[in-house]
Amino acid sequence: MSQNVPITVASGDGIGPEIMDATLRVIKAAGARIDIEEIEVGEKVYLRGISAGIEPSAWESLSRTKVFLKAPITTPQGGGYKSLNVAVRTAFSLYANVRPCVAYHPFVDTKHPGMDVVIVRENEEDLYSGIEYQQTPNMMESLKLISRPGSERIIRYAFEYARSNNRKKVTCFMKDNIMKQSDGLFHKVFDEIAAEYPDIENEAWIVDIGAAKLADTPEAFDVVVMPNLYGDILSDVAAQIAGSVGLAGSANIGEGCAMFEAIHGSAPRRAGQNLANPSGLLLGAVLMLVHINQPEVATAVHNAWLRTLEDGIHTYDIYADGVSKQKVGTREFADAIIARLGQKPEQLKAVSYSSAPAKERKTQSAKAQVPTLKELVGVDVYLDWSKGSAEELGNAFKQVSGEGLELKLITNRGAKVWPNGLPYTFCTDHWRARFQAPEIGTKIEHAQIISLLERVHAAGFDCIKTENLYNFDGKPGYSRIPGE
């Protein structure tokens, strides 16, 4: 018999303790070889003045076990409280969020009976880096960060997941027709890595039409990989159109640690009433069992759960006249699953887990090359200015040109407004002035930018930010502006 695996468990808030008790009873009855370390997270910890919602001592348990099974928590209303999930994901570099979204027709109502989609979401980068600034009285900024290494490991994880789980296709969602640098890099890396997996079909969709297709015809997709924000939104959408967010489990995977949970909230109004459906957390625990290399236990639990659905034993949230046969509470639902351990579903597709999804084989694609030539070719100077029109700003700001740097154009919220802007363009107090050499693309020096900023200050302008413009191997590493 294999040695027990230590795991860290947090029962959370609201319905959390009830569904955690049900989950642990089921997986233990199925033979899960685990040693449990309990920690406290959530509302009580927040209210003790710990802004992250987790006691400092709890980190020691997580660092030791490296496996975290977490029930939903309640974050108090008001400012000053941090996301516990973000804190754990960041601390342990849980870069891959994996959410299977499956329809259980006809036992759970759905418009898409054949849906079986896995969303693989990048978990650390994109707008979720949380780097934001207020730059003027009327303008906020949030930085979208997409890196090559971050893109490589999430995309490789998606392909390795597909291969390990006998999936046939991986689809990339992004928006590189607009965000040509950030989402463009994600798409480029996808194409590079896809070429290394000739046994798996691949395709790429612009996220808006891809999302529409996912909502309308989810049967067309298998594994879908995407950057953080799109993945956060569409994993909830996919879970809901499959049948219910309440049935979806989630895995957050890193190179050394992992966290498993339901994707629904703590539902405090249902707490303590033996009403909650433990399915989301239980399916999260199934993902955990695969991760800790107990696939036979995961298979037994998942098939018993499917058989329970088939037999019409349902909690209140999915109970339906004419389909369900018995409405049960949290404890009774767990008892019904335990009674069916060793059985398989007869109508729904039985599952069979073999091993944990392989992690990425290498951190960098063979085709990934560091640019050999990086050249500084200009600077964008951002201003807080509200003293007139774009034409007036352009005429006034031309005076700071010099020493090999010329004012080429001005934009407001990304739209070109000088020279030759249209009078209809709506402008705020946030302006971008682009300076480059007279011959665009010519290399400049940092000293020229420092001198430029001194002239900007001397002229009385409020410079709120600069962005250097670089060419990489002769290609612009910045967004070009229509009319430039």
Image (tube, rainbow, N blue to C red):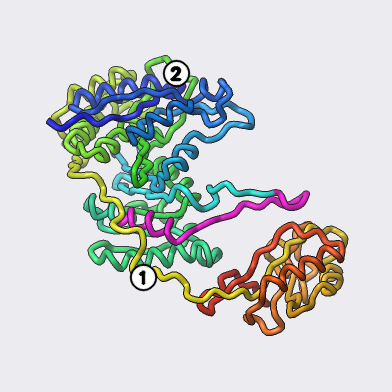
Q: Which residue extends farthest top?
A: 273
The crowd level at tag 1 (other Cα within 10 Å; few <14, some 14-19, many 20+) is few
Res 320 seen here:
no
Q: Amino acid at mark 2?
A: Ala
Q: Amino acid at mark 1?
A: Lys
Residue 315 sits in which quadrant? top left
Region rendered in magenta: 134-159
- The question of residue 136 being in magenta is answered with yes
Question: In the rendered image, which residue does mark 1 sit on?
Answer: 367
| Apparent side of residue 197 relative to residue 144 in the rendered image (left or right) | left
Q: Earlier in the sequence, mark 1 or mark 2?
A: 2
Q: Which residue extends farthest left?
A: 1
| Residue 434 location (% of width, % of height) | 71, 71
Nearest to viewer (mark 1 / mark 2): 1
Residue 101 or residue 230, whichever sits in front: 230
| Residue 398 location (% of width, % of height) | 82, 74
Question: In the rendered image, which residue does mark 2 sit on?
Answer: 271
> So how many labels did they put on this image?
2
| Apparent side of residue 155 relative to residue 474 in the rendered image (left or right) | left
Vertical arrangement, residue 182 with respect to residue 477, above or below: above
Q: Residue at x 83, y 67 (%)?
A: 393
Vertical arrangement, residue 343 with respect to residue 21, above or below: below
